[in-house]
Image (cartoon, rainbow, N blue to C red):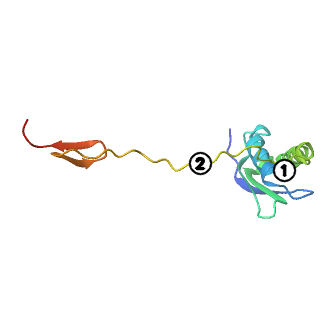
Amino acid sequence: MTSSSVIQVTCSLVSPTNEMIREEILKQAAHVSRSVRKLQFDQDGMTLSFEAPADEATDLRSRVEEFARSIQRALRRLERRVVYRSQVKKQEHYQSPTPPGVVALGPGQVAVSGSR
């Protein structure tokens, strides 16, 4: 088995992708081929690039483009919505007064001095 060189492959998409579609494409693109590595989108979401062996690049480009288009079609009307967001309350811990003869050394550590 001979190793071929790895090249950067770029796919142009028909429309820009939103954040949720990008996440889904990046998660599932590994199922297209084991040879597809280091997938990433450009800033505007119109171009997807990845690394692949040179001898498989043409085939993988068309397969990844078709895969990305199918994900875009499936999720085009889907929007991310926050249904409920809980309020984060500042947690206050009760500090009991330190009795005489007890010196706090650090979290959970004390030194005791004195006689009974």
Count of marks placed on residues: 2
Pointer 2: residues within 10 angstroms few (<14), some, or many (20+)? few
Residue 16 image point, x, y percent: 87, 59
Residue 62 image point, x, y percent: 88, 48
> Residue at the spot x=24%, y=48% of the render?
104
What kind of residue is marked 1? Arg
User: Could you say which is closer to the camera, residue 37 or residue 29?
Assistant: 29
| Distance Cα–Cα, label 1 vs label 2 | 45 Å
User: Could you say which is closer to the camera, residue 89 or residue 39?
Assistant: 89
User: Could you say which is closer to the camera, residue 67 or residue 116?
Assistant: 116
> Which residue has dot 1 on it?
61
> Residue at the spot x=32%, y=44% of the render?
96
First in residue order: circle 1 vs circle 2: 1
Instruction: Please tell me whether mark 2 sits on a helix, a strand or a loop.
Output: loop
Pointer 1: residues within 10 angstroms few (<14), some, or many (20+)? many
> Which residue has dot 2 on it?
88
What kind of residue is marked 2? Val
Query: Where's the N terminus, which quadrant?
Result: top right
Residue 61 image point, x, y percent: 84, 50
Q: Judge depth for marks 1 and 2 and give the one in front.
A: 2
Instruction: Please tell me whether mark 1 sits on a helix, a strand or a loop.
Output: helix
User: Could you say which is closer to the camera, residue 69 or residue 49?
Assistant: 69
> Residue at the spot x=69%, y=52% of the render?
5
